[in-house]
Image: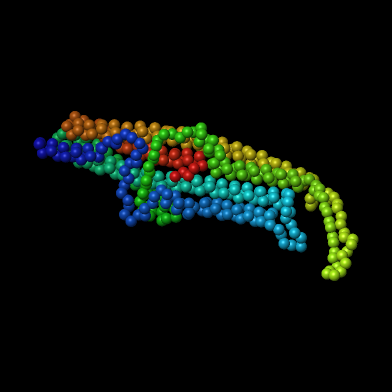
């Protein structure tokens, strides 16, 4: 009997090592599983940069911005530089009809640039989410693996107690059931980790199941909530979607002005002076030809109706752009408030889950001791172990939610999400 108690003490000590408490404080990251052997290592910055370089959507937006920029430069050259032909075009002073086209191309270039910033921010956030998701799944798999080890050790302890007549067959079967349940949880966690790894790799054009290790310097920093009121004014000024919508509205205003100019006749004052010299040593023509006249002309194919409907179409496009800007501002405001609410909940959840994990760890230690002494049954022990497992999972999930929602808040604000 004395030998049995010695064995009980050793087994209980092994279980107690798995129930270490977590101190209170700032956001902390749960331990992650060791790096896969031979797996390529990624930091958050290197992974996001690789994802942006590999993204077809980002490449498309970059080419669109490049094309719009070159088109604007072409229009600037056409409106500023003289054109060598049979006649010289490009007035040295005043306004040219080419100025409107140059302004439109400038706004198109700026709109494409804002669109590129928006797509880069969105893709960077998607990469950040994939990075954090893999890190979370790896952490949860480690927690589940530790739980499986604890359940296996618990079964061996209960089996020894059963042999010594201290536990019933029902207790032994319950311990084995919990052990098998832990194996099922680990199988599920392993599948979720592989799914997250597949998404992680596909996002950067790697082999879907290639192993990877994460260098996750996930320092959460201060947990104070941002100033929502001042940040909202910032978001409505610098968010790339809002900036793009404003450029589109300005471009539609310029197009409407051009349409209005196209439906009005052109009034011009012309002066002409022709003087012909007969050559060196010859008398000058004493009667040069000169004149001044007024002209009133209409645009080519002017029938008023076409110009009127073109103007109305430009005015409708302006109203559409204004409505699009209002819708974008509303969406940005909604996204910012949603991210703020989620971030507030994540901070609170993480703080409470840390306290819950510490309580569950202490309770598991107490129940382990009582179980060793024979005063606690296997149902009580199983519940204490499940509470501790749930608390660890909740803390890891809350930490992940805090990182994700803080990045989402930055994205809505118009800042770099990472």
Q: Residue furthest top?
A: 375
Give coordinates of residue 143: x percent, y percent: 31, 42
Give coordinates of residue 54: x percent, y percent: 47, 54
Give coordinates of residue 86: x percent, y percent: 76, 62
Camera-side residue of 192 and 234: 234
User: Where, quadrant-wise, is the C terminus in this rendering?
Assistant: top left
Please state if 115 lies on the left or on the right of 159 as rendered. right
Q: Eyeballing the image, is 167 above or below 136?
A: above
Give coordinates of residue 371: x percent, y percent: 20, 33
Camera-side residue of 171 and 220: 220
- The answer, for residue 207, to whether it is visible in the render is yes
The residue depicted at 74 percent of the width and 57 percent of the height is: 89
User: Where, quadrant-wise, is the N terminus in this rendering?
Assistant: top left
The residue depicted at 84 percent of the width and 60 percent of the height is: 274
Q: Eyeballing the image, is 356 above or below 296?
A: above
Please state if 208 lies on the left or on the right of 141 as rendered. right
- The answer, for residue 302, to whether it is visible in the render is no
Colouring method of the image:
rainbow
Q: Residue furthest left?
A: 2
């Amino acid at each position: 009997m004395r030998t049995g108690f010695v064995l009980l003490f050793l087994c209980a000590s092994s279980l107690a090592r798995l129930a270490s408490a977590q101190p209170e404080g700032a956001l902390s990251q749960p331990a992650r599983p060791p790096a896969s052997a031979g797996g390529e290592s990624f930091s958050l910055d290197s992974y996001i940069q690789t994802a942006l370089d590999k993204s077809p959507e980002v490449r498309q937006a970059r080419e669109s911005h490049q094309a719009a920029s070159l088109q604007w430069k072409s229009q600037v050259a056409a409106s500023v530089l003289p054109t060598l032909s049979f006649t010289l075009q490009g007035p040295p002073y005043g306004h040219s009809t080419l100025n409107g086209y140059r302004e439109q191309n400038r706004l198109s270039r700026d709109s494409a640039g804002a669109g590129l910033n928006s797509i880069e921010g969105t893709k960077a956030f998607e990469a950040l989410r994939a990075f954090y998701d893999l890190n979370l799944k790896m952490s949860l798999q480690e927690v589940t693996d530790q739980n499986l080890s604890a359940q296996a050790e618990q079964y061996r302890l209960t089996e020894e107690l059963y042999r010594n007549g201290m536990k019933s067959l029902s207790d032994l079967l319950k311990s084995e059931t919990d052990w098998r349940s832990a194996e099922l949880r680990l199988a599920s966690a392993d599948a979720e980790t592989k799914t997250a790894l597949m998404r992680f790799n596909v996002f950067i054009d790697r082999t879907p199941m290639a192993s990877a290790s994460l260098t996750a310097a996930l320092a959460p920093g201060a947990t104070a909530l941002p100033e929502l009121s001042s940040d909202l004014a910032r978001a409505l000024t610098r968010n790339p979607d809002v900036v793009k919508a404003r450029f589109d509205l300005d471009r539609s205003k310029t197009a409407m002005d051009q349409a209005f100019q196209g439906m009005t006749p052109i009034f011009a004052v012309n002066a002409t002076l022709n003087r012909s010299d007969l050559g060196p040593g010859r008398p000058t023509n004493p009667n040069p030809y000169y004149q001044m006249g007024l002209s009133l002309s209409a645009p080519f194919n002017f029938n008023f109706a076409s110009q009127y409907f073109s103007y109305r179409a430009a005015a409708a496009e302006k109203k559409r752009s204004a409505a699009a800007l209002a819708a974008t501002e509303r969406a940005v405001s909604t996204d910012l408030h949603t991210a703020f609410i989620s971030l507030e909940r994540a901070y609170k959840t993480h703080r409470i889950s840390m306290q819950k994990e510490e309580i569950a760890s202490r309770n598991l230690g107490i129940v382990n001791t009582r179980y060793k002494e024979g005063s606690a049954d296997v149902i009580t022990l199983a519940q204490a172990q499940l509470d501790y497992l749930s608390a660890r999972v909740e803390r890891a999930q809350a930490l992940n939610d805090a990182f994700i929602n803080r990045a989402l808040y930055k994205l809505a604000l118009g800042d770099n999400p990472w």
